Amino acid sequence: MLRYIVPLVVFLGVSVFLFMGLELNPREVPSPFIDKAAPTFSLQKLHEPEAHFSTSDMLGKVWLLNVWASWCVACRSEHPLLVQLSRAGIVPIYGLNYKDVPSDGKGWLQQLGDPYVSSLIDYEGRVGIDYGVYGVPETFVIDKQGIIRHKVIGPVTASALDECVLPLVKKLQQATAQQVVTRDTVEGCA
């Protein structure tokens, strides 16, 4: 009798964990980089390959780092929102052109509009790996001290902007050097 009960208990236990997993949202994978210093880098600019951009250039400013590629279908869906956000001038957006041929990236931006203050070339994907990127697009909110405060996995949506990203950016922009603002302080930004 015991030899039937043990497998049944194991099966039921595994079933419970699998059922609980069905309730999880894969877009809500917690990032180990939240509330930690953004990995530093210095990369060539897409439109000015002789010039470089470094994360240290942004110390003292709140900014977004959007990881994108011309071959990324989902990047097309978020792109009009990024263009609109860029035109509003609320927060500077920098693009990380991830594992893409620079000429393809330039053509894509010329065709669809360029929301970025500057796009940076990450041809081999090393910076993306440093940021824990496992798929494009991904967008990071980085504060004045160079700390990652939020990560949007997948395309940025209007609701993600309105409910989390923009309220968080506003709080971060208003914060003094002594104040610590995390995404937990913004309702709807978990």
Image (cartoon, rainbow, N blue to C red):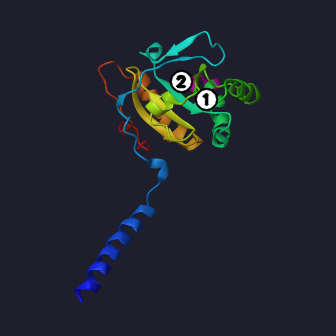
In percent of the image, x 72 and y 29: which residue is there? 108
Name the residue at the bottom extreme.
Answer: 1
How many residues crowd around disc 2 within 10 Å: few (fewer than 14), some, or many (20 or more)?
Answer: some
Quarter the N terminus occupies: bottom left
Q: Amino acid at mark 2?
A: Val
**Mark sitting on residue 134:** none
User: Is residue 63 left or right of 123 when viewed as pictured?
Assistant: left
Report helix, strand or loop for mark 1.
helix
Question: Alpha carbon of mark 1 to alpha carbon of mark 2: how far?
Answer: 8 Å
In the rendered structure, which segment of residues is drawn in magenta? 87-95
Residue 150, x across and y down, in percent: 43, 35
Q: Is residue 58 visible?
A: yes
Quarter the C terminus occupies: top left
Q: Which residue is mark 1?
A: 85
**Mark sitting on residue 91:** 2
Name the residue at the right extreme.
Answer: 111
Report helix, strand or loop for mark 2.
loop
